[in-house]
Amino acid sequence: RALAWSGSESFNEQEETSNETTDMLLYLNEDTFHGEVGQLLADEVRHCLQAGLPILLLHERDPAAGARTFSTFFDVTPADLISEGLYRNIALEWHPGPHRAVSVALVAKELGARPMKRLLFGAVKKGAK
């Protein structure tokens, strides 16, 4: 359940399909940086840090999805990633239930989404002159 997202596929695969990776989203839960997959994830994070790419930290807050207190990530994250500034920016919280929509909106905003212009339906009737 730990994942890294740097566009649409894993970092290496995306380099082949796109000329520009702009951000990395790092999902933080109980599985982040654990095991063999965790080491691969750490390598991707290193690459992004070295390339100067922004890394958006997304902290899982649902116990059913592997939520952990944020301080535990300092115990499992490779020391070089911490010293390179992985946790320099504040992580966004990924809340469950009725608060998920707010979490989604905050992530979208952080990744550059802008509000859509509201349309006033019925303001102009079809065929009006």
Image (spheres, grey):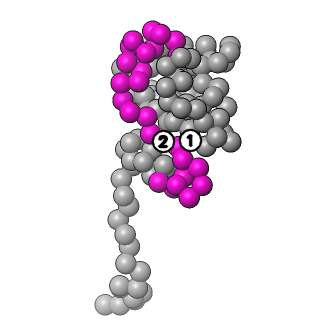
Q: Which residue is found at the position 68% from the left and 42% from the top?
A: 64
Residue at mark 2 to residue at mark 1: CA–CA distance: 6 Å
Tag count in the figure? 2
Q: Mark 2 touching mark 1, by CB under 8 A?
A: yes
Residue segment shown in magenta: 77-102
Q: Which residue is found at the position 37% from the left and 69% from the top?
A: 118
For label 1, count other residues whose C-alpha is less than 10 Å away and answer few (under 14), some (14-19) or many (20+).
Answer: some
Residue 83 shown in magenta: yes
Three-letter code for the amino acid on which mark 2 is drawn: Glu
> Disc 2 marks which residue?
93
Answer left or right for 53 relative to 4.
left
Answer left or right for 52 relative to 28.
left
Q: Position of residue 51 (x, y in %)?
A: 39, 17
Q: Position of residue 23 (x, y in %)?
A: 43, 31
Quadrant position of the N terminus in the picture: top right
Answer left or right for 76 relative to 64.
left
Front-most of 113 and 28? 28
Q: Is residue 5 visible?
A: no
Q: Which residue is found at the position 49% from the left and 26% from the top?
A: 71
> Disc 1 marks which residue?
61
Q: What secondary structure is marked by label 1? A: loop
Q: Position of residue 11 (x, y in %)?
A: 54, 23
Quadrant position of the C terminus in the picture: bottom left
